[in-house]
Image (cartoon, rainbow, N blue to C red):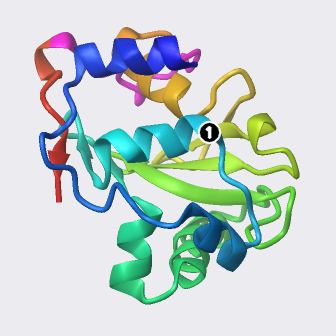
Amino acid sequence: MQDKLDRLIHLVPPPRHPNDNKGDWAQIEAETNLKFPEDYKRFIGIYGTGTFCGIMEIDSPFCAARVWGSIQERYHKGTALFKMLDEIGGLVSYPHYPTVPGLLACATFGSDLLGWYTDENPESWFMIYRSRTGEYFELPEFGFVDFLFGAITGEIPIDRPFFDPIRQEDYRPYLPH
């Protein structure tokens, strides 16, 4: 995993002064009743909250705790978006956080949503991509950093016209916010 993170850092430089990249993971995990994957923790430690290649919005849990006052409240609201869109579209997708296993929102990719399918073992979590058209794609081989790396290298196995891998000309330093 560290190899992909190193390669990601080379392709998309992190900010010199990342926002909300440090905090107490034990407190976050106690409040959410979850243990987060190590690749995500390392990513947040290097990049913090921000915009990846101008298209993917990634919130650090430390930002969410500061802004929302409660990280659990932030995850409830983020995951509620999946649920609301499913209800509008008549879909039944996955159990939602705080249910484990279940879907936990973690980022947006343009107008599409990204979440983890959580498990008791955080290293078993994998990415779920929900397209703007309401389709779900399970990516069991992709953790958080794997997804980011795959999105910029074209290695994400989603063969749909709406999923556009990030083009090399769009690689740009991570924009903290």
Q: Is residue 171 above or below residue 89?
A: above
150 falls in the magenta region: no
Q: Which amino acid does label 1 sit on?
A: Glu
Q: Which residue is drawn at 49% across and 10% down?
A: 155
Q: Main secondary structure of the magenta part?
A: loop
Residue 136 visible in rendering: no
Which residue: 66% across, 79% down? 31
Q: Quadrant of the N terminus?
A: top right
Q: How many marks?
A: 1
Q: Residue 3: horizontal and vertical position, in percent? A: 49, 11
Residue sticking out furthest to the bottom: 69
Crowding around mark 1 (Cα neighbors within 10 Å: few <14, some 14 to 19, many 20+) is some
Residue 167 x, y percent position in the rendering: 23, 15
Q: Residue at x 84, y 69 (%)?
A: 99
- Relative placement, left or right, of 168 versus 77 is left
User: Residue 53: percent from the left, percent from the top?
Assistant: 21, 33
Q: Confirm whether residue 94 shows in the render.
A: yes
The relative height of residue 48 versus residue 137 in the rendered view (above or below) is: below
Task: Verify whether residue 162 appears in magenta.
Answer: yes
Q: In this view, does 89 lie above or below 136?
A: below
In this image, 155 relative to 63: left or right? right
- Position of the C terminus by quadrant: bottom left
Tell me if 170 is positioned left or right of 58 in this view.
Answer: left
Picture residue at 64% right of the left edge, 66% below the top = 26
The residue stretch that appears in magenta:
156-168
Label 1: which residue? Answer: 38
Q: Which of 79 and 2 is in front in this view?
A: 2
- Give the side of residue 154 with respect to residue 36, left or right: left
Where in the figure is residue 13, as x and y percent of width and height? 19, 26
Q: What element carries label 1?
A: helix
